[in-house]
Image (cartoon, rainbow, N blue to C red):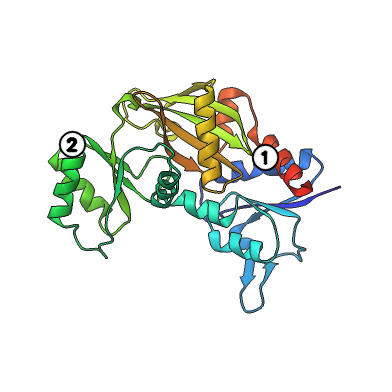
Amino acid sequence: MTYNGWVIYNGYLRSNKFFDYANMIHEAATYYGHESKLFKNNELISFLEKLSIQSMDTDVTLPDYVVFTDKDVYLAKQLELLGVPVYNSSQAIEISDDKIKTYQILGSKNIPIPKTIFAPKTYGNDIDHKFVETVKHIFPFPFIVKEAFGSFGEQVYLVKNERDLTECLHKVNGKPFMFQQFISTSFGKDIRLQVVGDEVVAAMKRTSEGDFRANVTSGAKMEPYEPNETEKQLAIEATRAIGAHFAGVDLLFGEHSPIVCEINSNAHIRNLLDCTGINVAFDLIKFIENDLRS
């Protein structure tokens, strides 16, 4: 059977890395004989009064599946309501994109995460002094302040003292955010495990010499990593917990055992290919084929 698939990415994000991720999947689908099309999210028009989708430039027939490499969950949901299998689902993308929702799900399933307290909704008002003082009693300096929405480590702050805290609270004012335990045993290092289905298909260790974060975008170095069974199982359980078919799971080195840091439902896979020689796009397409047949 020849499958007709779409790969959707965001048309407003100018960095080439977003197109590159989508194109890697598109090329893998083409390699396996699929009729694959790349679409920007702004090339598709969604009608709500009678659910339908049209392309701005060409007539389209709904595909057998969509690989959704964006966070435009309204478009992903529109496709699902029209009966199209979407990988990952709109719900999994929405949970993964919101770190507070992610931690709530993981905590409810007793999956190890750093001790975390989410801040109350303030509608742009300053968070009250008593709440902050209570947090400081629970988390002595240093601790982490992390925005609920963000990518590439850019919205994560290490708070070392009162001055840092004041500056940080000013930055995040009006945004959903959380206070989080700082895992000192993982300073400047973590591991990324790429899960597809019920399998870890690739992994790498990331290390930064001068930053508490280990994001490659921020200059961290990467090396191939062979995870142990505990790390593999934790990554698989975390992916399954948010309802994702595939994900890049970041684990921290806890004092005694690994801890889930984040789950990325649309983890870019170019760095993994450069580091390990494994093109995860092929694993994604084979998983989708098997899932569609089941």
Q: In the image, residue 32 lies at what x, y percent?
A: 79, 39
Work out whether 63 lies above or below 20: below
Query: What kind of residue is marked 1?
Result: Leu
Q: In the image, residue 99 lies at what x, y percent?
A: 41, 48
Query: What kind of residue is marked 2?
Result: Pro
Circle nearer the viewer, 1 or 2: 2
Circle 2 Cα neighbour tier, 10 Å, few/some/many (<14 / 14–19 / ≥20): few
Q: Is residue 267 visible?
A: no
Horizontal side of residue 289 vs 124, given as left or right: right
Horizontal side of residue 112 vs 167, given as left or right: right
**Residue, x 25% and y 56% (percent of image)?**
173
For the view shown, which residue lies furthest in the right direction? 1
Q: Which residue is mark 1?
A: 284
Horizontal side of residue 7 vs 238, given as left or right: right
Q: Is residue 3 visible?
A: yes
Circle 1 Cα neighbour tier, 10 Å, few/some/many (<14 / 14–19 / ≥20): many
Q: CA distance from mark 1 to mark 2?
A: 42 Å
Q: In the image, residue 78 lies at what x, y percent?
A: 62, 65
Q: Which residue is mark 2?
A: 140
Label number found at residue 168: none
For the residue pair 103 and 59, the one nearer the viewer reads as 103
The local secondary structure at tag 1 comes to helix
The local secondary structure at tag 2 comes to loop
- Quarter residue 75 falls in: bottom right
Q: In the image, residue 58 lies at what x, y percent?
A: 74, 64
For the residue pair 261 and 125, the one nearer the viewer reads as 261
